[in-house]
Amino acid sequence: MRSWSPYLVGAGIGVLSWLAFLLSNKPIGCSAAFARTSGMIEKLFRAEKVRENAYYKAFVPEIDWEWMLVVGVIIGAFISAQLAGTFDLRWVPDRFAQAFGDDPLARLAVALIGGIFMGFGARWANGCTSGHGISGTLQLAVSGWIAAACFFIAGIATAMFIYRVFGT
């Protein structure tokens, strides 16, 4: 697999952070976009309850710059994969298939459960990997560095646990 230079990618993320501060006066972060999306979906069925909900008063269910950042991440990932010549549509990555089989539903279930845990943790911590890990460390916030270290430790420990305990 070809990959981009980590220095080039780091510089790009730094420029993106500068632009975010310059244009929106906010650090990069995207976990609130998922909370806003859940509010937009819930609003379709229970609009009045969503309007009265204290959480959704703080995180108004609407398309905002964080929501558009998530869209941009998806588009950017596609473009970078195309430019690197590594774009490949597949339901089950090779490493997952070797350990757990090539059932797309199993992969989808694991990804969904992991995503729910990540989203819940991000909202509970009032920030996500991009908010704490990128914007926090960029501003030299101690909380950002602690959070980034914990992301790596927890990610490595979780992957080792899942692949060694449940993998073949």
Image (cartoon, rainbow, N blue to C red):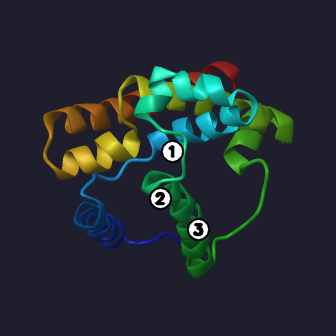
Residues at marks 2 and 1, CA–CA distance in whole angstroms: 9 Å
Q: Quadrant of the N terminus?
A: bottom right
Residues at marks 3 and 2, CA–CA distance in whole angstroms: 10 Å
Image coordinates for residue 155, horizontal then vertical, percent: 46, 32
Question: Which residue, given by chain and number where applicable, does mark 1 sit on?
Answer: 33
The foreground one among 141 and 146 is 141
Label number found at residue 75: 3
Q: Secondary structure at mark 1?
A: helix
Identify residue type, mark 1.
Ala
Q: How many badges with numbers are in the image? A: 3
Question: Which residue, given by chain and number where applicable, does mark 2 sit on?
Answer: 69
Residue 103 visible in image: no
The foreground one among 144 and 106 is 144
Image coordinates for residue 102, horizontal then vertical, percent: 84, 42
12 relative to 83, above or below = above
Q: Secondary structure at mark 3?
A: helix
> In the shown orientation, is residue 63 left or right of residue 124?
right
Residue at (29, 32) in percent of width and height: 147
Residue 95 visible in image: yes
Image coordinates for residue 126, horizontal then vertical, percent: 35, 30
> In the shown orientation, is residue 49 left or right of residue 146?
right
Q: Which tag, 2 or 1, sits closer to the chain's start?
A: 1
